Image (spheres, rainbow, N blue to C red):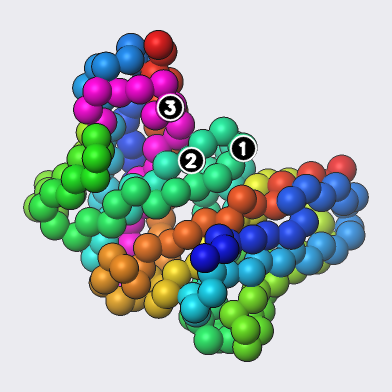
Amino acid sequence: KNEVEQSPQNLTAQEGEFITINCSYSVGISALHWLQQHPGGGIVSLFMLSSGKKKHGRLIATINIQEKHSSLHITASHPRDSAVYICAVRKSSGSRLTFGEGTQLTVNP
Amino acid sequence: KAGVTQTPRYLIKTRGQQVTLSCSPISGHRSVSWYQQTPGQGLQFLFEYFSETQRNKGNFPGRFSGRQFSNSRSEMNVSTLELGDSALYLCASSLDGLLSGSHLQETQYFGPGTRLLVL
């Protein structure tokens, strides 16, 4: 079983829809990162969370440490949001990142 | 500020050869991490360098090695290439690496990657 699991693996939405991507982990962590990867490979770091909630534009990330769960929400989705969204955790015991398998999001106009 | 650069962007090698990939971090960043991304395994951590020292290493065989220079530029080397080494190799730089707990210090900036194909 992977230490970091994301759902869904694939998500197709219509422009304007509210989107939620989930990340569950099974280890103790000190931080959780959400990353965005566009076709061609470029990766952008969206959020780093250790508790609570963060918001940046139309993106909102939440984390529940007790439940070992994080969600990434996209409000008013747009075709340019189409990308792979990757959850990664930094375990309490070390500094390396462990990654989920990613969620492929496609937003249709 | 210029972003993270990686060279070369694309590379084709044959089994048994060795390869060296280069990563230039954002100016002022002292931590460089390397990752391998494949369709089957996803993103996996290779190693992290901070101030010319390897601070952390992933679960890869000894054929994978790296180093960091005094200007924070980093190289990774893969010897005796295998077909399974075909992947996108990404490096990421940050101010302080993954230990500070500070978003500013920990945020990683990724390079465009080197796509390696082993035939």
Q: Which mark is residue A80?
A: 3
Q: From the viewer's perspective, is residue A39 above or below residue B4? A: above
Whether the residues at callouts 2 and 3 have beta carbons within 8 Å, the answer is no
Q: From the viewer's perspective, is residue B47 above or below residue B39? A: below
Q: Is residue B63 left or right of residue A72?
A: right
In percent of width and height, residue B87 lies at 68, 46
Residue at 43 percent across and 27 percent down: it is A80
Q: CA distance from mark 1 to mark 2?
A: 8 Å
> What residue would you read off at disc 2?
A37
Q: From the viewer's perspective, is residue B3 above or below residue B105? A: above
Q: Is residue B56 left or right of residue B90?
A: left
| Chain for disc number 3 | A
Image quadrant assignment for residue A13 = top left
Going by the numbered disc 2, the residue's amino acid type is: Gln
Q: Which mark is residue A20?
A: none
Q: From the viewer's perspective, is residue B47 above or below residue A40? A: below
Going by the numbered disc 1, the residue's amino acid type is: Gly
Magenta stretch holds residue B24: no
Going by the numbered disc 3, the residue's amino acid type is: Arg
Q: Secondary structure at mark 3?
A: helix
Instruction: Mark yes or no: residue A100 visible.
Output: no
